[in-house]
Amino acid sequence: MSQRRGTPLLSEAEAAAPAVTRVQAIRQAVERPSDAWLAARMIAWAVVLPALARLLPLPSLVRRLWHEKASDNQERRAERVLALAQAIYGRRRPLRDNCFFRSLLTYRFLAEASADPRLVVGVRRGEGGVDGHVWVMLRERPVHENSVSLAEFSPLLVFGPLGRAESLEEFPPPE
């Protein structure tokens, strides 16, 4: 869970659970040799994304992240991407949970798995001004979080296939 003003860093269940290192979390998420290769590629992208985000405007970056690849088992591949992204962007440094980078990484690898993701940038009124948040939608549902946590956010931008901006009028609210 990302830290936002007025929002606890960890849920009660997460705080009570025994600490798991990032390496342990990734090992737990890897089920097959192909998952290990996917994890290595995702970690490499996770390291590079902060630099790319500083160099490129968001629309240009998102277009470059879209990568279609034929996938035999699209459903399993999408599940592995979600599990590994969660393991990579856990609560431990140096890749502490960050909605922006986690969502860019997830969007990129879900696109590669032919899962047709949407990258959403939204805002809400916060205690000290405006809070921003970025999340990924898959089959009209948010990934890595629940709809209740997104209810206060108004989408500003939605990126779909090929990294192209989509009309907000066509964007369905999270279920």
Image (tube, helix red, strand yellow):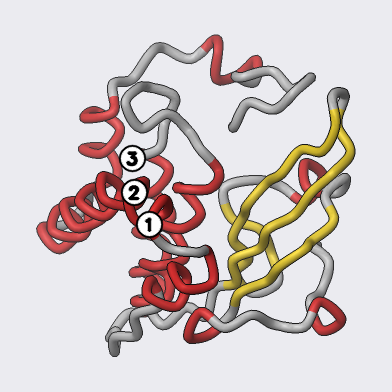
Residue in the picture at 65% in, 15% down: 12
* Residue 167, x across and y down, in percent: 77, 83
Closest to the observer, 156 or 147: 156
* Residue 134, x across and y down, in percent: 63, 52
Sequence-wise first label, 2 or 1? 1
Amino acid under disc 2: Leu
Give the labeled residue for mark 1. Answer: 55
Amino acid under disc 1: Leu
The image quadrant of residue 27 is top left
* Residue 13, x across and y down, in percent: 60, 19
Q: Can you tell which mark lies on residue 88?
A: 3
* Mark whose residue sits in front, 1 or 3: 1
The image quadrant of residue 20 is top left
Residue in the picture at 20% in, 51% down: 44
Closest to the observer, 58 or 146: 58
* Residue 136, x across and y down, in percent: 59, 60
Closest to the observer, 175 or 67: 67
Q: CA distance from mark 1 to mark 3?
A: 23 Å
Q: Residue furthest bottom?
A: 70
Q: In the rendered view, does 67 fall on the left or right side of 121?
A: left
Split into 4 quadrants, where in the image is the C terminus?
Answer: bottom right
Q: Can you tell which mark lies on residue 84?
A: 2
Count residues near mark 3 (Cα–Cα under 10 Å), then give few for <14, some for 14-19, many for 20+: many
Sequence-wise first label, 1 or 3? 1
Residue in the picture at 64% in, 45% down: 145
Whether 142 is drawn above or below 88: the answer is: below
Amino acid under disc 3: Ile
